[in-house]
Amino acid sequence: MNETMVCAVGRVATQPVYRELASGPSARFRMAVTARYWDREKNAWTDGHTNFFTVWANRQLATNTAASLTVGDPVIVQGRLKVRTDVREGQSWTSADIDAVAVGHDLAWGTSAFRRGSRHETAAGASQPEPNWETTPEGSPQAQDPPAQVPAQSAALT
């Protein structure tokens, strides 16, 4: 299916509204995205037009969004763009919604402390084994080392 995926960078304009629906949790908030450009005449950055998007989050993303965001927070939202045209009281209205796949704080403006949310156990209750993150070929001595032992060349990259 062809969908228009977008990544919008802006600020939370309204407090997220959280609801428990029959299909699961849902949250929505308005996001303001303002274009900025360098004005050579003023020799300064200038704000351009502001676009507003209604961001929709579902399931666990809705729960985490409602618990994490407040008005004014800088955010990055990735999701499916949906533009709708409607006629209300004789006037034509156009709305742009983003069905969010990912929502996060924009760390260019500050810091954030990540806390893993509670996970619902699967029906089988089985947990997946820890992946082997080493980049060496399978079966080599470094691939068998426990994760705490980092090769010297990898430690220099951090």
Image (cartoon, rainbow, N blue to C red):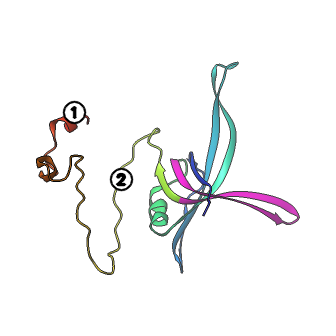
- Quadrant in the picture for the N terminus: bottom right
Quarter of the image holding residue 41? top right
Picture coordinates of residue 143, whole percent (x, y): 16, 50
Residue 34 visible from this viewpoint: yes
Residue occupied by mark 2:
114
Q: Is residue 40 above or below residue 146?
A: above
Q: Is residue 26 magenta?
A: no
Quarter occupied by residue 14: bottom right
Q: For the point 32% across and 75% down, which residue is it?
A: 121
Q: Residues within 10 Å of mark 1 (few under 14, many from 20)?
A: few
Which residue sits at x=54%, y=65%? 27
The residue under the point 49% across, 55% down is 103
Q: CA distance from mark 1 to mark 2?
A: 25 Å
Q: Is residue 80 magenta?
A: yes
Which residue appears farthest toward the right when viewing the image?
Answer: 90
Pinpoint residue 50: horizontal percent, then vertical percent: 68, 43
Horizontal side, residue 8 vs residue 125: left or right: right
Q: Which residue is mark 1?
A: 156
User: Magenta residues, as a range?
Assistant: 74-100
Q: Which numbered disc, 1 or 2, marks the residue closer to the eye? A: 1
